[in-house]
Image (cartoon, rainbow, N blue to C red):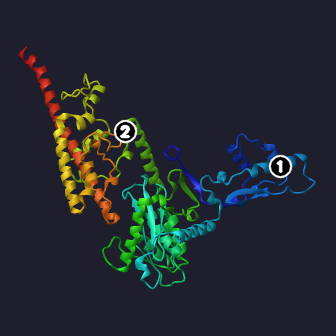
Amino acid sequence: MATLSSPLSLKRTELDDVSLGSVSLSHALKLFSFHSPDEPAPDGNALRSLRGKGIRLLSDMGEWRVQPPGNWAIQSKSRPSTSSWSLAAIKSWDKMSIVIRSLEVEWFSPGQPDLILPREHRRSEAERSIRQLAHISNLRPSLTAALLPSQTWGSDGSMTPASAGILDSKSVTAAITGPKTLVLKINGRNVSILQGELIGLIMGLVLSNPNDPDATLYTDHLNSVRLIDDSRTIVDQQHRLRFMNGRSYYRWILALVSTNPLKIIYTRGHSTEQSVPSRINFEADHYASRSQRVLQDVFPAPVPTFTMDDFTFHSHIDGWIESSIRYYVDKSAARSSSQRLADSHHQRMALHLYDSKAPPEYSYTHAYSAYSAVVQLYARSGQLPTAQVLHARGKLATPRCRMGCAADEDMHHVFVQCPRYAEWRTKATDALLQRADAKLDEKNIEEVDRVHLLAAVKLLFSDNNFWPLHYSTYYLGHIPRFDHLMPTHRDEDSVSHSRLAHHFASEWHTACIRLAGRIWGDWQREMSKKTDTRSRRNVEPNRTS
């Protein structure tokens, strides 16, 4: 798994044996020699001398202490006062004491020093941090909850972009609102809206008053509500969590639910009703989605390592991985392969540069003719029989454009630059502009807010700086990222905004591959005519001889 773009390792999630000093001196010495290779270190004779005196573990020579301002350091013990110690053993003790005083807790748990703490301690620290962040939060409490006699909460999550996959860059936020309002972000690529929804529930359980029997939390995450309801029966739910994505968050929720009578009730999300559940869910959604614009000011949510499996996969880039490891490895391997292909094949498959929304299914799974999809497949693999490709295979004497242009005939020239199809590209742009304008009219988008998006439509079929590499690759089924051009002035929910963005992505993708299909179909017909003409010229003299 080290061959993946982000090496994968299987890590222990509980290292309290380190804090207790149950680590062999030989292991500590190896860590010291690795991190401080220029410092003198005791040799094997010193270790054997100490083992002869019963000194084998780190706890035999010192113990970890938390020093201000919260750093871990080892406080060495005094050497046992006994006359049986030889001069060599005393020197070995002194040398090893210098080593253990230089040890750093990061060496035992790289990047995760909190793992050396007991699980219960880590959980209490995580819940304490949530309470402290809620106490200093300057977000306004829920206006709906303020009018109710008992504690009422609403939670929700948000992910941008909504279509991001497991290895795509994304931002996930979670919000809780009620007597207090708090928004946290969940870091990492290997997270989804699921973690946002679950952290919202966790915040509600931590912040609610356990002495209020009428306290209620409304959420639009139905799976969590069902699991919580089932957990309040006599049937143990732990077996259900064994292979679930986000199981550490679920375990944290069930641990909180076991001591908190908070009623967690499902309410339909993004509803236009004016009931209390709908209004408070709308407020939570508002905080979760709007906080995406100021992520730099949002605190990260605690990671529940204290409820993870004893051994959990970890990646330096993606953090802890609780999703299907087979799916993760398959996706990572495919991503690594595509990046290698992208770097070595004129960036044809550099998908990370372009918009990541899923293409529409029609052209690939439902259309009567798959010609546009086939052209795109051959283009992405670099197998379209352009003059450049045929010349490289020894089938043409020159790679020059067969339409008479003073340029080499490669895919980019045929689809973007060749003047034969300039009118086709212009008409395709005008048609796309007309449909985009109509859609924006339907959504009541003001003229001033649609200018940038419509300007981008005009740039799809030509080379310009709207494209990440400054040249158009529409014929490969790519479209530039355009989320930053979407109108944001309207007070609409994130789902409506996402639907509009997906609509434009589908429209643009379909227009791109259809234009590419039309151009290549015409190109093939013209090349067929030229081939037939040359064949007749070669055959006619033989007929008259």
* Position in image of residue 23 (x %, y %): 72, 55
Tag 1, which secondary structure?
Answer: helix
Image location (x, y in percent) of residue 247: 50, 65
- Above-or-below relation of 262 to 362: below
Res. 323 in view: no
Image location (x, y in percent) of residue 67: 71, 60
Q: Which residue is mark 1?
A: 94
Quadrant of the image for the C terminus? top left
Question: Which residue extends farthest left?
Answer: 544
Which residue sits at x=74%, y=42%? 39
Q: Residue at x 72, y 56 (%)?
A: 73
- Camera-side residue of 494 and 235: 494
Instruction: Give amino acid for label 1.
Output: Asp
Report the residue marked by disc 2: 347
| Residue 467 makes an appearance in the image | yes
For the residues labelled 2 and 1, the Cα–Cα distance comes to 60 Å
Question: Is 245 left or right of 50, judged from the image as shown?
Answer: left
Residue, far right? 83
Counting other residues with Cα less than 10 Å from the Cα at mark 1, is it few (<14), some (14-19), or many (20 or more)? Answer: some
- Identified by mark 2, the residue type is Gln
- The residue positioned 18% from the left and 29% from the top of the image is 403
Residue 306, how many percent across, how many down? 58, 64
